[in-house]
Image (cartoon, rainbow, N blue to C red):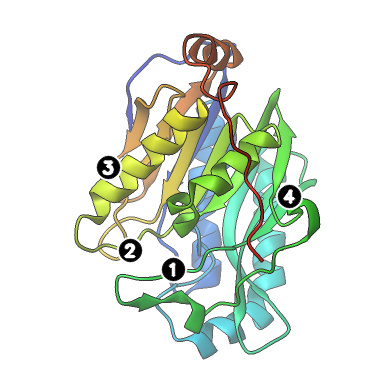
Amino acid sequence: MSADLQPVPSAATVVAAAQFAGTADVSANLAGMEQLAAEAARRGAALVVFPEASMYDFSAPAEEIAAVARRDGSRFESGVRAIAERHGIAVVAGLYSDGGGPLARNTLVAFDAGAKPLGRYEKLHLYDAFHYRESDKNARAPLLDDFAELTTFDLAGFRFGLLNCYDIRFPEMARLLVDRGADVLLVSSGWVVGPLKEMHWETLLKARAIENTAYVVASCQPAPMSVGLSMVVDPSGIATATAAGGAGLALAPLSAGRIAAVREILPCLAHRRYQVVQKR
């Protein structure tokens, strides 16, 4: 289910990437997420990240997803909040929210262990690639002034930034989150299978970690629809925990000292000569 490649210090802040498939049964999805969150909490994790579209089958037609978003979006979000509170663990999860139009919004929500909202992010980059058109199913989030569309939150001494699946192909977004203080990038994904897609997934996650000298915690839906390979990546680009196969957890500790040590030997953030600006 998971492979932890290094021991977990007793005083470390542990995080978990949950590998989980969203089905067409919202209640069953919440029950499956609760089992994984309970296991992550039992194993000492302070935070568990679930995939994009944990709420509902992302392969469903657009009209069905929009109807489910209107009918069950608030119920699912309340369920995620209750899971966090019951098990004393912060939770990030992907859902479909009602955008007020014909299409749903692909949304990530985050709650702390006391069920307090930590952040909400609507997907910026829709996956119109590899003969797939997510923009036919979900509404694209707008850009806002001063990059207010980006989402970060503080927890357990770290700042976390949210990314959703296709977002990892856009390094400027990860860099902007790091510019806003993120030292851990949280990725929720349903990374669809396709030619070389497993290689792309792993390479991009490690690249985002290396170029930003930041942790990456990546949760993906498993095969057969998605590639799986949920993982935690060290700031040097090494995967310290990986989930193989079906549902499971990849757990690993976060260390502020590790981030500082990597950035001391590789001060690429300090060596930057360009800034990122918005494209309207």
Mark 1 → mark 4, Cα distance in angstroms: 22 Å
Badge 1 marks a residue whose secondary structure is loop
Return the x and y of residue 188 as percentages of the image width and height: 50, 52
Return the x and y of residue 266 as percentages of the image width and height: 47, 15
Residue behind mark 1:
127
Badge 2 marks a residue whose secondary structure is loop
Q: Earlier in the sequence, mark 3 or mark 4?
A: 4
**Between 20 and 87, which is closer to the camera in this rendering?**
20
**Which mark is in front, 1 or 4?**
1
**Which mark is in front, 1 or 3?**
1
Q: Amino acid at mark 1?
A: Tyr
Q: Which mark is residue 119?
A: 4
Mark 3 → mark 4, Cα distance in angstroms: 29 Å
Badge 4 marks a residue whose secondary structure is strand
Q: Amino acid at mark 2?
A: Val
**Which mark is in front, 3 or 4?**
4
Return the x and y of residue 117 as percentages of the image width and height: 78, 49
Residue behind mark 2:
192
Instruction: Give the quarter of the figure containing the N terminus.
Output: top left
Q: Earlier in the sequence, mark 1 or mark 3?
A: 1
Q: Is residue 226 left or right of residue 28?
A: left
Residue behind mark 3:
244
**Which mark is in front, 3 or 2?**
2
Up the image or down, 95 lies above or below 14; here it is below
Label 4 near label 2: C-beta < 8 Å? no
Q: Amino acid at mark 4?
A: Gly
Query: What is the residue that sits farthest to the front in this orientation?
Result: 273
Q: Is residue 161 left or right of residue 25?
A: right
Instruction: Give the residue drawn at x 71%, y 31%.
Output: 155
